[in-house]
Image (cartoon, grey):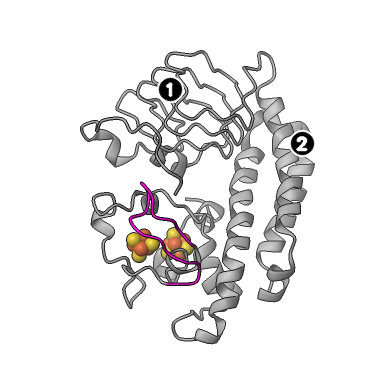
Amino acid sequence: MSPMTDRLTADCSRCAGLCCVALPFAASADFAVDKAAGTPCHHLQPDCRCGIHAGLREAGYPGCTVYDCFGAGQQVVQVTFGGRDWRANPELADSMFAVFPVVRVLHELLFYLEEARAHPAAAPLSDALEAAFAETDRLAAGTPEELAALDVEAHRRSVADLLGRVSDLARAGGRGPDHRGARLLGARLRGSDLRRASFRGALLVGADLRGADLRGADLLGADLRGADLAGADLREALFLTAAQVAAARGDTSTRLPPTLARPGHWAAARAPRRRHPARR
Ligand code: SF4
Ligand code: SF4
């Protein structure tokens, strides 16, 4: 694993359960109970480990199995706050919980920029990508005060524009259908030719994508929870994350980019399809 990939991969052993405290969640198909932001989940142990880690899905918390902080957790604890945590230093809790989502956005952008930098089609944008990467990295290393004051959404929009240009270059020469931001909940797309389509920010919750050809499709930010990818071909898909794949359903015939592992739960016997899995 490269040092940057390592940095952008969650290391819960160097965090303090930040996602289990800082974030709110609503009782749904993904979380068994409501939890307010800044309140520890009642399954969080004193050592900041999850008390039901081995049985999250069975206990009604599948949303926890697909959450990815892109390494923001250990960055906030170890770098932003110099190794201090909210349990030993409760006076830091509010500040730590406030900056965690900001750093998560920045780390997610770094993850996409890392992929974009390595894409051969992005060569004409290499200078812009290097500059965006350096600036995002600089922002992520900010102090708690700097992070709290940052307009992270403005920075996200700026990087998203650049990533959109990368996507256009990568999908040139036969761009597929444009489904950016589309609401495709439960859509029947079985066996569809979706090569080099854009599903950027699309809602594909519970969509039937069995056997679909998604080679080279842009899936940045697409919500794939409960989408059925059995037999689908996602090789060369752009900006697809492990968390998106884990939130979807698939089988041994689903073809993934080489950087992504097949989720362990895909190998299990298929459960009956849910029609509209709720938001996590
Ligand atoms: S915030 Fe990230 S590193 Fe921390 S516990 Fe959650 S997933 Fe692990
Ligand atoms: S169930 Fe476990 S992983 Fe999920 S929020 Fe609670 S402590 Fe964290």
Give above or below for 235 relative to 64: above
State the residue at coordinates (77%, 50%).
Answer: 131
Do the CB atoms of the residues marked 2 and 1 lie less than 8 Å apart?
Answer: no
Residue 209 circle label = 1
**Classed neighbour count for the residue bearing mark 2: other residues with Cα under 10 Å, few (<14), some (14–19), many (≥20):** some
Percent position (x, y) of residue 167? 67, 30
Residue marked by disc 2? 125
From mark 2 to mark 1, how far is it between C-alphas?
32 Å
Q: Nearer the viewer, mark 2 or mark 1?
A: 1
**Classed neighbour count for the residue bearing mark 1: other residues with Cα under 10 Å, few (<14), some (14–19), many (≥20):** many
Which amino acid is tagged 1?
A: Leu
The span picked out in magenta is 24-39
Q: Nearer the viewer, residue 7 or 67?
A: 67
Give above or below for 180 relative to 72: above
The image quarter containing residue 200 is top right
The image quarter containing residue 176 is top right
